[in-house]
Amino acid sequence: MTNPGGPRKQENQAHLLADHVTTPKNIKFEVNTKRYFNSSKKRLALAGVCRFDSRSNDLLQIADLLIGAITYDLKLSDGVVPGSKYKIKLVDYLKEDLGTESFRQAFRNRNFNVFVENNEENKKRRSS
């Protein structure tokens, strides 16, 4: 069957892996998170939410460390954090190893891909 409106643009969908946080029994974290996110995007952008204890997963710990370092670099360049010499040392090591001067702009190298949506709303969120 063909689409009478022409070919449909393929939309990206994500799956969220969230660290387990205890919530009251009447709170449906996965359902509420997915509903809120998709509602804000006005489409099916978040296909699934799964929570588990990150302490039991080494790969998630590494991913968390990398995301934290990239976020720290963004906050540092925005002047939101004063700068810890140990965190800066880790960020500088990652930038040197990956061959980039900053994570501020979109960056791709080997199998490492950083996408930063540069808009005022995200800048305000990062500073809070």
Image (spheres, grey):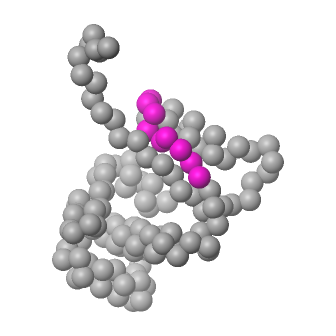
* Residue 17 lies within the magenta run: no
Give 121 or 71, whichever is nearer the viewer: 71
Rendering coords of residue 100 (x, y %): 20, 74
Residue 51, by quadrant, is bottom right
Q: Who's the residue at 29% across and 57% down the image?
A: 115
Rendering coords of residue 58 (x, y %): 52, 76
Range shown magenta: 42-50
In the rendered image, is residue 72 in sight?
A: no
Q: Who's the residue at 24% across and 22% down the image?
A: 7
Residue 128, relative to residue 62: is it above or below? above
Rendering coords of residue 83 (x, y %): 40, 81
Residue 69, relative to residue 26: is it above or below? below
Q: Please state, as top left, top right, bottom left or bottom right, where the N terminus lies in the image.
A: top left
Residue farthest toward the top in the current orientation of the protein:
4
34 relative position to 87: left or right: right
Give 106 or 50, whichever is nearer the viewer: 50
Q: Who's the residue at 53% across and 44% down the image?
A: 48
Q: Who's the residue at 48% across and 72% down the image?
A: 59
Give 126 or 117, whichever is nearer the viewer: 117
Rendering coords of residue 9 (x, y %): 27, 29
31 relative position to 123: left or right: right
Residue 11, by quadrant, is top left
55 relative position to 45: left or right: right
Residue 61, relative to residue 92: is it above or below? above
